[in-house]
Image (tube, grey):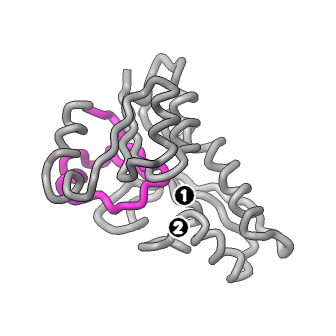
Amino acid sequence: MKRIVIFASGSGTNAENLIKFFHNSDNASVIQVLSNNPHAKVLDRAKKLKVSALSFNRIAFSKTNDVLNILKASNPDLIVLAGFLWKLPEHILNEFPNKVINIHPALLPKYGGKGMYGMNVHEAIVANNETETGITIHYVNEHYDEGNIIFQTKCNVNSSDMVEDVAAKIHKLEMEHFPKVIESLLKN
């Protein structure tokens, strides 16, 4: 059975979707959710679905090996960033080469980098009158949104679309594709 650990900072809809998707799987399961925000809704979602949920601070994450030791004990086959806003420190990336992936709410390399997450991305898409956007699932390296791309899919942006409309389209793509891409990665 493959083991998935999720990092998330916010409400956790992607995390919940992944937990539910793999709940009855014979191949993989989400074994833990970790968050840098002790008040994140993702922690409550995970606990309701009977998945271990822990929060940590910046010192435990990047200045000590506390989070790394939690990960080593969990022995994940894949670490999934699902709305996680901090850059992973090198000591974690080095310990889990090619085992950390992220989902980004745009078609990288466009609209990537520090500060480009969630509504910030959707606002930029609308402000720049883009006609399409989408999601990118990619490996994580030491730079924001620059790891090798695993999967992308697109949707149209209409001239009448508001930021919330774009967000809803992206959310739909995430819910549909993220679990399937993870399942495929874990089978290979």
> Residue most toward the bottom?
128
Circle number at residue 122: none
Query: Which three-letter amino acid code belongs to the residue tagged 1?
Result: Thr
Q: Is residue 24 visible?
A: yes
Q: Place residue 96 in its image quadrant.
A: top left
Q: Residue, x 55% and y 36% (percent of image)?
A: 16
Q: Residue, x 71% and y 76% (percent of image)?
A: 126
Query: Which three-letter amino acid code belongs to the residue tagged 2?
Result: Leu
Q: Which range of residues does the magenta coloring cover?
A: 75-102
Taking the magenta stretch, the answer to whether it contains residue 95 is yes
Q: Quadrant of the C terminus?
A: top left
Q: Is residue 184 visible?
A: no
* Numbered disc total: 2
Q: Which residue matches tag 1? A: 136
Whether label 2 touches label 1, CB < 8 Å: yes
Q: Is residue 92 left or right of residue 159?
A: left
Q: Quadrant of the N terminus?
A: top left
Q: Place residue 67 in its image quadrant.
A: top left
Viewer-proximal residue, 146 or 61?
Answer: 61
Q: Earlier in the sequence, mark 2 or mark 1?
A: 2
Image spot of residue 12 (x, y percent):
53, 45
10 Å neighbourhood of mark 1: few (<14), some, or many (≥20)?
many
Figure check: 49 above or below 37: above
Q: Residue, x 50% and y 71% (percent of image)?
A: 116
Circle number at residue 108: 2
Image spot of residue 105 (x, y percent):
58, 61
Image spot of residue 109 (x, y percent):
50, 71
Element type at mark 1: strand
Image spot of residue 185 (x, y percent):
45, 38
10 Å neighbourhood of mark 2: few (<14), some, or many (≥20)?
many
